[in-house]
Amino acid sequence: MEHGANKALIGKRILLGVSGSIAAYKAVELLRTLMREGADVSVAMTDAATKFIAPLTFEVLSRKPVTTDLFAAHQEMLHLTLPEEADVFVIAPATANTLAKLALGLGDDLLSTMVLTASCPLILAPAMDGGMWNHPTVQEHVRLLRSRGVTVLEPVEGPLASGKIGKGRLTDEQTIVSAIETCLLPKRDLAGQRLLVSAGPTQEPIDPVRFISNRSSGKMGYAIARAAQERGAEVLLVSGPTALPVPPGVRCIHIDTAEDMAKALTTNFRWATIVIMAAAVADFRAEKASSKKIKKRTGTWKTLALTTTEDILSTLSRQRTRQILVGFAAETDAVLAHARKKLADKNLDLIVANDVTAQGAGFGSDDNAATLITRDGDDIVLPLMPKRELADRILDALQPFLTRAAAPKTK
């Protein structure tokens, strides 16, 4: 849909922050687009941003005074009232320095103080030069902000102001507007659906202090649970041991072993309309776990008898009535071939295939890249993106199956 066609943001109050990047000039067109869509936009600028573009430009277009100085704003308490009245706070561009301030909770200028006082959703569109985006400190700040629920958009790779080629260009205007619309006008396309999702690893005991497990963090399954709940579904999460907080509004059953997970999923399977098996269930367990701690011995421990755990997804597939089934294939080689075989063998509707050896997309990462393979023969190749964004793309791919399931049966 062309932005502005339906004035999707009529009456929405948006606080647009502009920090000191050469990309500040792009915020002008963003302001114009938001106003064409009917939004009421107020602009706040850092002192550095005013070196790149004059506040008067934003004042003329927004038809409102632009706040630039914390002490001047303090006289009218604008550093409090503007964030309190906003429906969403967008900072575009957001520099590496701005990301650091917000991650650390600093409030040494107007923009950072406004963020501290805001209770509305926050969207950041970073822009920076050189290799700054990939610097470990910047990436840690991004991870911290995202863990608090802040939407941090990915910058674009291309020519930078310095003449270098790299990832740091401000993302396109349409992406920013779409993020605002998603935030203010969330999808409710899963209303009435009941989603059963598994997440995390399992722990198979060897003795009371040791176990067999894997590197799964649970982040992907938790992101799916959160996304589905926000899109209107009733969500039940079956989670192996993780350090993640349960998303608001999501019911959760905590388990330890593959046997526990199988029991929880099969018990609730008939209730579900969609089942997404994002957990990394251990393939093997000790044939006989010791009831006492096995003492350390000199030399090698030559044998540990293992047996396979239950293939939960195959079990669920045999029991399905109307449920849409989604599996994951975390592979290290021949990723698509293995995923297609798993899709067919387990009679799934969709499988999410990913290479766990790919840089930035392995276990424990906040990002992932995947190929969604459907039983209809479609391959949807998705680049590296935040797992929360990938969760929405997976749910988007289920829409044809939901439409088909809702269609009246012909005789």
Image: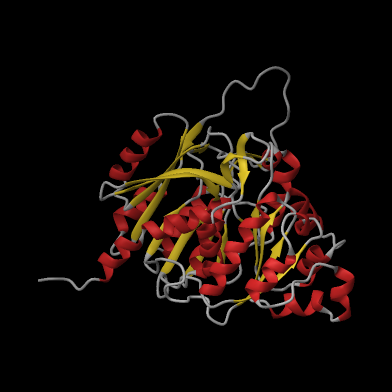
Residue furthest to the top? 299
* Residue appearing at x 20%, y 73% in the figure: 408
Picture quarter containing residue 184?
bottom right
| Residue 102: x %, y % from top left | 77, 58
Residue 229 point in image, percent of width and height: 51, 68
What sort of colour scheme is used for the picture?
Answer: secondary structure
At horizontal 66% and vertical 19% (from top left) the residue drawn is 300
Quadrant of the rendering where the C terminus is positioned: bottom left
* Residue in front for this viewpoint, 50 or 135: 50
- Tally the numbered discs: 0
Q: Is residue 83 above or below residue 377?
A: below
Q: 154 left or right of 394? A: right
* Visible residue check, residue 366: yes
Quarter the N terminus occupies: bottom left
Whether residue 94 sits left or right of residue 385 in the image: it is: right
Q: Residue furthest left?
A: 411
Residue 308: quadrant of the picture: top left
Task: Give the image quarter of residue 250.
Answer: bottom right
Image location of residue 280, percent across then percent down: 51, 45
Q: Nearer the viewer, residue 387 or 137?
A: 137
In the image, 79: left or right of 159? right
- Can residue 226 be spotted in the picture? no
Would residue 402 appear left or right of 65 to someone viewing this image?
left
- Compared with 379, 263 (above or below) is below
What residue do we see at 32% from left, 51% from top? 348
Image coordinates for residue 272, horizontal then vertical, percent: 39, 66
In this orientation, which residue lies closer to the viewer: 106 or 206?
Answer: 106
